[in-house]
Image (cartoon, rainbow, N blue to C red):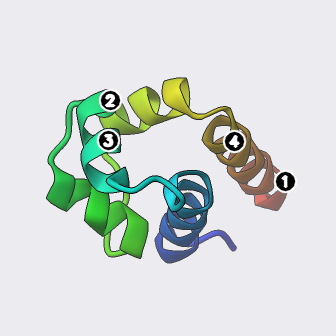
Amino acid sequence: MTTAAVISGRISETLRREYASYRYAEKLLARKVNASPRAVRNWFSGVCSPRAAELVRLMAESEELEREVGRLIRELREARP
């Protein structure tokens, strides 16, 4: 079962993989998706996941995140009875 914690963790891992090498990753990503640096820090740490509008903006910025969300969706569909 793909729980909220698993989903949050996978989004967090993907964002960190893509943006960790940037010097000011939190501020950079926050500006790109119109969020606060604190929100981005929470996404990176897995404390919480982006809200729907933020997630769509993030997916527009990151093809890797878009692919990961697609994988999560396929997993959820396959797990349905």
Q: Is residue 59 left or right of residue 47?
A: right
Tell me if 2 is positioned left or right of 26 in this view: right
Question: Residue 27: horizontal and vertical position, in percent?
Answer: 24, 47
Seen in the picture, residue 78 relative to 44 is either above or below; the reply is: above
Q: Which residue is mark 1?
A: 78
Whether 21 is drawn above or below 69: the answer is: below
The amino acid beneath tag 1 is Glu
Could you tell me residue 40's position as x and y percent?
29, 55
How far apart marks 2 and 1 lie (CA) works out to 33 Å
Report the residue marked by disc 2: 32
Residue 59, above or below 27: above
Q: Secondary structure at mark 3?
A: helix
Q: Which residue is at the front of the view, 39 or 20?
A: 20
Q: Tell me the amino acid under the disc marked 2.
A: Lys
Which is nearer the eye, 44 or 25?
25
Return the residue at label 4.
64
Return the residue at label 3: 28
Amino acid type of the residue tagged 4 in the rendering = Glu
Q: Nearer the viewer, mark 1 or mark 4?
A: 4
